[in-house]
Amino acid sequence: MPDFATYPSLKGKSIIVTGGASGIGALIVESFAAQGARVGFLDRDAEASAALAGRLDGVAFELCDLRDIAAMKAALADLRAKIGPADVLVNNAARDDRHDWREIDVDYWDERQNTNLRHMFFAIQTVAPDMIAKGAGSIINMGSNSWWEAGAGFPAYATAKAAVHGLTRTMARELGGHRIRVNTVVPGWIMTDRQKTLWATPEALEDHRRKQCLPDLIQPEYVARMVLFLASDDAAMCTASNFMVEAGSI
């Protein structure tokens, strides 16, 4: 394993991660906990949430479906009571389910936007007042390089992820006067268990390696490390920007 950095400025900070029970989100939760932060996460998977929190000291979670904004706001309030007002929000939750553009109806389109985009804004709206009161904060939105690559097979997902960049830029301007930073982390194809189970065939992996400048497949911990950097005081002058973790993929 690489000798990863420690960020003293993260110790004792209150961190909220959406979609934190599995995949990249779980690595983000683990990485913040290892820094000595107070971590709370939201997820709808009760079994995975309990398992993750059970093996990490001082990590709290609340169950909710992020498509239900009222339920999400209530869960965020419960986390606030457990770990304190947020210093950092990581808007991680999303699902890249495949779909055929010819078969999408209005209900499916709206559900994909609610799954991959809408909750990000309302999570920001909910936690930002505490950050404003503190005069500091870091908000990290999870984007995707799928739309940059003009990837096919998930147009509703790609549209939502493209919109994340607009959300980041405008909220960085809205909140910057309070020293709240808003950035986008842009993963490439990350080798989570879900990706390896559903789509990482030998042929697909070989084709993707040819698209990357670096030959190695990207593990979830590298996305988590970028999130840690952006949450830390080391990134105090970084805002309204995209931070790529995609091995130079084209």
Image (cartoon, grey):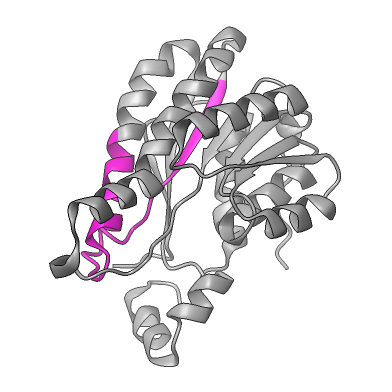
Give the answer, above or below, for where 135 lies relative to 207: above
Residue occupying the point 68% across, 27% down: 78
Return the x and y of residue 215 as percentages of the image width and height. 46, 78
**Relative side of 110 to 94, left or right:** left
**Residue 162 is inside the magenta segment:** yes
Residue occupying the point 61% across, 51% down: 225
Residue occupying the point 44% across, 53% down: 94
Q: Is residue 238 visible?
A: no
**Residue at the far left in the pictured view:** 102
Q: Which residues are magenta?
A: 137-166
- Residue 103 sits in which quadrant? bottom left
Q: Quadrant of the C terminus?
A: bottom left
Return the x and y of residue 15 as percentages of the image width and height. 66, 33
Residue occupying the point 43% across, 66% down: 247
Viewer-side residue, 162 vs 67: 67
Return the x and y of residue 127 as percentages of the image width and height. 54, 22
Q: Quadrant of the N terminus?
A: bottom right
